[in-house]
């Protein structure tokens, strides 16, 4: 691994829109479809979760907040909230559920320039992380409850944990600790002092010594 690489990264969320999912079956529905444990979720608690493709590529990332025994607010980027609603509704059959996009807005991080964002270690959904990425290629710890049971993409996720590793990982590189000539991975965004890049995990034993 490169010297100066960091794994303690966070998702940049300057503004989030909300989708309200309510009904008797809300908890079971979200538990079945996402990477998070919605059956052990206290009212008022918030957890990050992912909705994956069957191949474990990222369809949606969101922050889930339990507002009552029968309702959750899913906080996602404003430009993706409508698609999140549509994609979840595709799996709604006979469950007692209601889906409603409301006007609530949540701000996790203040607005930052691209340089400030990268230097703060905040990865951007749509720039550093896209639908082409597998969940395990990003800092996934907050998004995944491994013991929760089945969900779309779980088979691929568990196969990686059991038999090997993904071929690349998103990292934050301190540009002041490495010469530019030695960067042999794809940089997704660059700040004044740091940069996000994907390093090939198969090379980690050979680089950064």
Image (cartoon, helix red, strand yellow):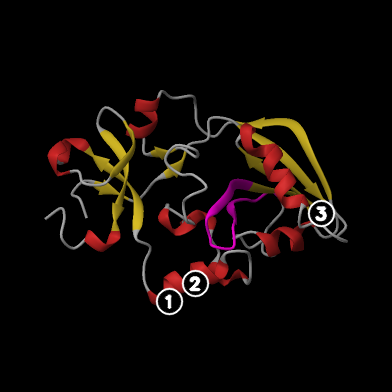
Quadrant in the rendering for residue 37: bottom right
Q: Position of residue 170 (x, y in %)?
A: 36, 49
Residue 52, placed above or below residue 81: below
Kindly tell me whether residue 11 is visible in this rendering. Answer: yes
Is there CB contact under 8 Å for labels 1 and 3? no
Q: CA distance from mark 3 to mark 2?
A: 30 Å
The mark that comes first in sequence, 3 or 2, is: 3
Q: CA distance from mark 1 to mark 2?
A: 6 Å
Q: Secondary structure at mark 3?
A: loop
Is there CB contact under 8 Å for labels 1 and 2? yes
Residue 166, placed above or below residue 142: below
Q: Position of residue 149 (x, y in %)?
A: 62, 72
Which residue carries the number 2 mark?
Answer: 158
Q: Nearer the viewer, mark 3 or mark 2?
A: 2
Q: Secondary structure at mark 1?
A: helix
Q: Secondary structure at mark 2?
A: helix
Q: CA distance from mark 1 to mark 3?
A: 35 Å
The mark that comes first in sequence, 1 or 3, is: 3
Is there CB contact under 8 Å for labels 3 and 2? no
Q: Is residue 144 left or right of residue 22?
A: left
Q: Is residue 74 left or right of residue 121?
A: right
Which residue carries the number 1 mark?
Answer: 162
- The residue stretch that appears in magenta: 44-63
Q: Is residue 204 left or right of residue 133?
A: left
Image quadrant occupied by the N terminus:
bottom left
In terms of secondary structure, what is the magenta stretch mainly? strand
Which residue: 29% across, 60% down?
A: 201
User: Mark 2, residues whose alpha carbon is within 10 Å: few (<14), some, or many (≥20)?
Assistant: few
Kindly tell me whether residue 179 is visible in this rendering. Answer: no
In-front residue for pair 17/90 = 90
Which residue carries the number 3 mark?
Answer: 70
Which residue: 36% across, 67% down?
A: 165
């Amino acid at each position: 691994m490169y010297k100066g690489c960091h794994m303690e990264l966070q998702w940049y969320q300057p503004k989030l829109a909300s989708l309200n999912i309510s009904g008797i079956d809300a908890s079971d529905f979200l538990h079945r479809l996402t990477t998070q444990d919605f059956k052990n979720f206290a009212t008022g608690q918030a957890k990050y979760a992912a909705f994956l493709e069957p191949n474990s590529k990222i369809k949606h990332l969101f922050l889930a907040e339990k507002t009552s025994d029968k309702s959750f607010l899913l906080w996602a980027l404003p430009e993706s909230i409508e698609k999140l609603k549509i994609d979840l509704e595709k799996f709604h059959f006979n469950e007692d559920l209601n889906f409603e996009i409301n006007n609530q807005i949540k701000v996790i991080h203040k607005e930052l320039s691209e340089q400030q964002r990268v230097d703060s270690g905040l990865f951007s959904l749509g720039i550093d992380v896209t639908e082409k990425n597998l969940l395990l290629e990003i800092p996934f710890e907050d998004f995944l409850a491994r013991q929760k049971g089945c969900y779309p993409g779980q088979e691929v996720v568990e196969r990686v944990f059991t038999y090997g590793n993904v071929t690349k990982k998103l990292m934050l590189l301190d540009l002041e600790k490495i010469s530019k000539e030695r960067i042999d991975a794809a940089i997704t965004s660059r700040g004044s002092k740091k940069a996000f890049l994907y390093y090939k995990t198969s090379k980690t034993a050979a680089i950064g010594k």
